[in-house]
């Protein structure tokens, strides 16, 4: 089981709690987690990554286990603690200053 | 007994204000989509309980929301706006060509007859249509074939912000794009052509009378006279009597002919409203006085409407989609400001009241007259 923490606005949009739990078939890659998340919550499509290019939106960040995974490729494996469900995979709206 | 529903899009959510036909007491619901920018929300003329909302942020992009119960509940529908074919390029700030990139939806215009058909005007400028209530969107690419390679973004972005449907001819649509101009289709959106003859932009364009490139801010039509359009351009208030074949200036005695929105009285096709703004460099009312100007002669002769509006130290703006009318017997006029006020007049503009005054900056105001 993968634990995913959504930012406030996406939690509201998905009508989900702070943390959602996903079952992933196969390797726990960054792309596989996002695919599973969007399959379960289709309204999130386009809000985290671009519909066509599948690139992360510029002001979205991916954190886990104290690391910034935002620049990892989609095929990158997530840390074991995320795969084991002991640490969450965090989707974060970047700070915007001002 | 009629009721009125005012749909307000703001920088931080949507608000829905309702009143009886007296328009004295208003119930306010919201914020809907709290924290999101709501560029526009609009109701279907064919089913007033069908609403569409354009919801976006810089973080999470674009969403489209749909309501079937007048805004009590909403569901997210499709947000996939993909340009038809190879998107192509348009002029960029540095003179190079730049690929079309979808940024947001500025305008949602439901069909006059079918609640499931709705048009979306987007940035970078293009027109999309959904025929299934927003479940899927398809571009009408013929518009970008109308010299799209020459369009270029203004400071506010290259946005398609105005969509006017001709009630007498379902195949005729007018649209306007910032820093590109006005365009018309007569075949339901397959082919388009610029309709900018008579517009003059000597301060903005090297060729003041160019076929495209004019910064049109808003266009309004009275449904009984669809060949007559009124336009608030960057500078100049304009009028056409031949569906855009030629325009003439009707700014007349306005204190400034710069502004954003324009609207036509519901029952008097020659009565037009604008909100003069000091200049393109100073986006607030001249002399710190918030004044709506009304012409009862189809332009040229304008009177200031000030009763109930702040007449000193007022430095708000009124954006292009933030002025609307109801269709009650005594026509109501409504506008929202970047200071968060929504002002309403139940007597065609003679007197005004703030029906709400501390919202986030208002981006759009639409009005539904309900049975």
Image (cartoon, rainbow, N blue to C red):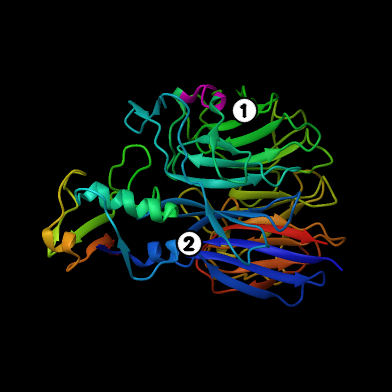
Residue at 25 percent of width and 47 percent of height = A31
Horizontal and vertical percent for residue A65? 13, 64
Label 2 sits on residue = B11
Badge 1 sits on which subunit?
A: B
Label 1 sits on residue = B196
Left or right for A96, reference B284: left
Horizontal and vertical percent for residue A81? 13, 63
Asked whether B11 or A88 is in front, the reply is: A88
Q: Residue furthest front?
A: A25
Earlier-in-chain disc, 1 versus 2 = 2
User: How far apart are the two marked residues, 1 and 2, measured between alpha carbons?
Assistant: 32 Å
- How many badges with numbers are in the image? 2
Picture quarter with the N terminus of chain B: bottom right
Left or right for B237, reference B347: left
Q: Which residues are magenta?
A: B142-148
Instruction: State whether residue A64 appears in this view.
Output: no
Asked whether B203 or B321 is in front, the reply is: B321
Q: Secondary structure at mark 1?
A: loop
Name the image quarter holding residue B69. Answer: bottom right
Tell me, yes or no, whether the highlighted magenta stretch contains residue B162.
no
Q: Is residue B312 above or below residue B259?
A: below
Residues at circles 1 and 2 in contact by the CB criterion of under 8 Å: no
Residue at 69 percent of width and 30 percent of height = B247
Horizontal and vertical percent for residue B195? 64, 26
Horizontal and vertical percent for residue B349? 76, 62
Q: Secondary structure at mark 2?
A: loop
């Amino acid at each position: 089981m993968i634990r995913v923490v959504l930012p406030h606005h996406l939690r509201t949009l998905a009508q989900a709690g702070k943390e959602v739990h996903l079952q992933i078939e196969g390797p726990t890659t960054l792309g596989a987690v996002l695919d599973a998340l969007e399959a379960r919550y289709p309204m999130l499509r386009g809000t985290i990554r671009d519909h066509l290019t599948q690139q992360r939106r510029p002001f979205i960040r991916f954190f886990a286990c104290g690391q910034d995974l935002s620049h990892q490729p989609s095929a990158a494996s997530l840390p074991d603690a995320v795969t084991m469900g002991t640490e969450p995979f965090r989707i974060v709206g970047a700070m915007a200053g001002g | 007994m009629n009721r009125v529903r005012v749909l307000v899009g703001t920088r931080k959510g949507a608000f829905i204000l309702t009143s009886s036909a007296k328009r004295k007491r208003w119930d306010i619901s919201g914020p809907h989509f709290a924290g999101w920018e709501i560029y526009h929300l609009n109701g279907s003329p064919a089913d007033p309980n069908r609403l569409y909302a354009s919801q976006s942020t810089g973080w999470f992009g674009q969403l489209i929301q749909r309501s079937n119960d007048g805004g009590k509940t909403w569901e997210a529908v499709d947000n996939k706006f993909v340009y038809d074919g190879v998107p192509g390029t348009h002029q960029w700030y540095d003179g190079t060509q730049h690929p079309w990139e979808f940024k947001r939806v500025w305008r949602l215009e439901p069909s006059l007859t079918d609640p499931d058909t709705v048009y979306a005007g987007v940035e970078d400028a293009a027109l999309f249509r959904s025929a299934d209530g927003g479940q899927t969107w398809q571009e009408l690419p013929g518009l970008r074939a109308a010299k799209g390679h020459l369009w270029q973004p203004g400071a506010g972005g290259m946005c398609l912000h105005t969509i006017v449907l001709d009630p007498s001819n379902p195949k005729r649509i007018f649209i306007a794009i910032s820093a590109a101009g006005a365009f018309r289709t007569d075949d339901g959106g397959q082919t388009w052509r610029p309709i900018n003859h008579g517009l003059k932009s000597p301060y903005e364009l090297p060729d003041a009378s160019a076929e495209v490139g004019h910064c049109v801010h808003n266009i309004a039509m009275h449904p009984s006279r669809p060949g007559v359009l009124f336009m608030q351009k960057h500078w100049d208030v304009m009028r056409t009597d031949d569906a855009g074949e030629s325009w003439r200036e009707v700014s007349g005695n306005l204190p400034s002919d710069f502004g954003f929105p324009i609207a036509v009285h519901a029952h008097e096709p020659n009565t037009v409203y604008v909100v003069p703004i000091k200049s393109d460099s100073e986006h607030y009312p001249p002399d710190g006085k918030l004044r709506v100007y009304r012409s009862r002669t189809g332009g040229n002769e304008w009177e200031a409407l000030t009763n109930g509006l702040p007449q000193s130290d007022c430095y708000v703006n009124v954006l292009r989609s933030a002025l609307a009318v109801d269709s009650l017997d005594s026509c109501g006029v409504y506008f929202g400001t970047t200071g968060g006020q929504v002002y309403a007049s139940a007597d065609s503009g003679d007197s005004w009241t703030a029906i709400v005054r501390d919202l986030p900056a208002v981006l759009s105001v639409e009005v539904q007259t309900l049975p």
